[in-house]
Amino acid sequence: MIAEKSALSSAEEVLRQIEKAAQREFLPIVGPSRGKILVEEVRKAKPRHVLEVGTLIGYSAILMGKELDENAEIVTIEIHRDEAKIAGENVVRANIPPKVTIITGDAVEVIPTLNGPFEFAFIDAEKSEYLQYLDLAENKFHKGTVVVADNAGIFADQMSDYLDYVRNSGEYKSRYVQVGDDGVEISVKLQL
Ligand SMILES: C[S@@+](CC[C@H](N)C(=O)[O-])C[C@H]1O[C@@H](n2cnc3c(N)ncnc32)[C@H](O)[C@@H]1O
């Protein structure tokens, strides 16, 4: 007997499971609405090297990874060991094409140890530290690197230094995309 093939890919199944879990218990994932904007940016940029700050249990890494091919690599940093372990299991189950490297540690300490370059970054960890993450990662970016920062609506106060920098330093072309009552800041690096 031929087994019936699921209409959903493994990645989509894992994403739906995490979305359901996020509704049951408080899980601050990017979610499907802002996730759609993230996916659009990944599709446009087609990055080979992605940096993610704030893995949680792997939802956004899988969301980005299912848009990329096996030549791509996602490096994602999570401070909590338990979350990083579950993320690892979810990434394996999702069976996405890129290599995903989950690093357990404080992004402030981990980012300086990374080689880069990165053509895409998703920042979604401690809101008051966004500018610090960017400062530490910036020398691994190049012209055209896209940086998406989550929760730029509801946590705009906590990340005001970050928003001021990407909007006014002249280093980025930056725009805010409102999604429901929150939003993402999308910043494209202008020079090397
Ligand atoms: C909003 S959640 C990330 C959600 C995830 N990006 C998603 O959409 O599925 C933020 C995560 O960042 C982690 N985090 C907070 N501060 C961190 C730091 N300094 N370094 C690394 N991870 C950090 C938290 O433990 C938490 O799991």
Image: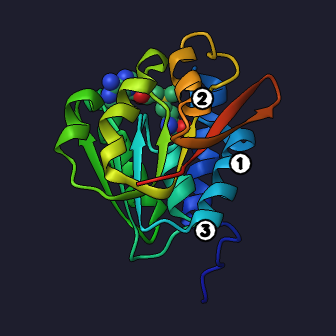
Residue beneath label 3, please?
9
Circle count? 3
Would residue 189 be found to the left or right of residue 102 on screen?
A: right
Label 2, label 3: how far apart the Cα atoms are = 42 Å
Q: Amino acid at mark 3?
A: Ser
Residue beneath label 2, please?
168
Upstream in the sequence, badge 2 or badge 3? 3
Q: Residue at x 39, y 76 (%)?
A: 71
Of residues 144 and 91, the one nearer the viewer is 144
Q: Position of residue 64 (x, y in %)?
A: 54, 56
Circle 2: element type: helix
Q: Callout 3: few (<14), some (14-19), or many (20+) C-alpha neighbours within 10 Å?
A: some
Indicate which label's residue lies in the foreground, 3 or 1.
Answer: 1
Upstream in the sequence, badge 1 or badge 2? 1
Screen quadrant of the N terminus: bottom right
Of residues 58 and 9, the one nearer the viewer is 58
Relative to 3, does residue 17 appear above or below in the rendering?
Answer: above
Ligand 1 sits in quadrant: top left
Of residues 104 and 95, the one nearer the viewer is 104
Residue beneath label 1, please?
37
Label 1, label 2: how far apart the Cα atoms are = 23 Å
Screen quadrant of the C terminus: bottom left
Marks 2 and 3 close (CB-CB < 8 Å): no
Q: Is mark 1 within 8 Å of ligand 1?
A: no
Q: Amino acid at mark 1?
A: Ile
Q: Position of residue 140 (x, y in %)?
A: 32, 51
Relative to 60, does residue 155 appear above or below in the rendering?
Answer: above
Indicate which label's residue lies in the foreground, 2 or 3.
Answer: 2
Would residue 156 be found to the left or right of residue 74 on screen?
A: right
Q: Position of residue 186 (x, y in %)?
A: 63, 42
Would residue 33 be found to the left or right of residue 119 on screen?
A: right
